[in-house]
Amino acid sequence: MSSDLRLLSRRERQIMDILYRLCRATALQVMQEMGPEPPSYSTVRTLLGILEKKGHVRHEKEGHHYTYVPNTPAGEARYSALTHLMDTFFNGSASAVVSAIIDLKQDKLTAGEYEEILELVEKSRKEGQ
């Protein structure tokens, strides 16, 4: 990863979350996704510029607008964030993370999702041998 996503400000993190969700966006699209009280358009452009200087995003010129794209692939960012979460809140324990997810979603998990989790665990067990 070009630089650590964990070191971003709250607004920078919010913009990165939007860019990962949308895959690519203009400053106006980012601003519109920032909730009921977004910062000004110029503030969003400034934050995107800061994120670009930090190496988190790049821009592509499309007509009269810049479209911003994350530099770090979503899978890599997801892995980094999950590793940080697991180390910070679960003492590095994968089983504690899975247990927390199951507890959190207990009433919402379908039979198919439970089966998928079991299949993933079994697959991982077999590959680990």
Image (cartoon, rainbow, N blue to C red):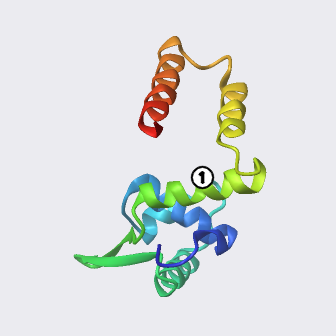
State the residue in front, 94 or 16. Answer: 94
Q: Residue 107: where, in percent of width, then height?
A: 67, 16
User: Residue 111 placed where, x, y %?
Assistant: 52, 12
Residue 77 image offset from top left, x and y in percent: 50, 61
- Residue 58 percent across, percent down from the top left: 38, 78
Q: Amino acid at mark 1?
A: Leu
* Residue 5 relative to residue 93: left or right: left
Q: Answer with the quarter of the image where residue 4 lies.
A: bottom right
Q: Which residue is mark 1?
A: 82
Q: Which residue reaches farthest top?
A: 111
* Direction front: furthest residue: 129
Query: Could you tell me which residue is drawn at 47 percent across and 35 percent down?
Result: 124
Residue at screen point 39% across, 62% down: 73
Q: Is residue 10 above or below residue 115?
A: below
Q: Residues within 10 Å of mark 1 (few under 14, many from 20)?
A: few
Eyeballing the image, is 71 above or below 17? below
User: In the current view of this chain or complex, which residue is farthest to the bottom?
Assistant: 53
Image quarter for residue 57? bottom left
Q: Secondary structure at mark 1?
A: helix
Residue at 62% across / 19% down in the picture? 108
Q: 117 or 64, which is in the foreground?
A: 117
**24 to the left or right of 93:** left
Name the residue at 54% across, 15% down. 110
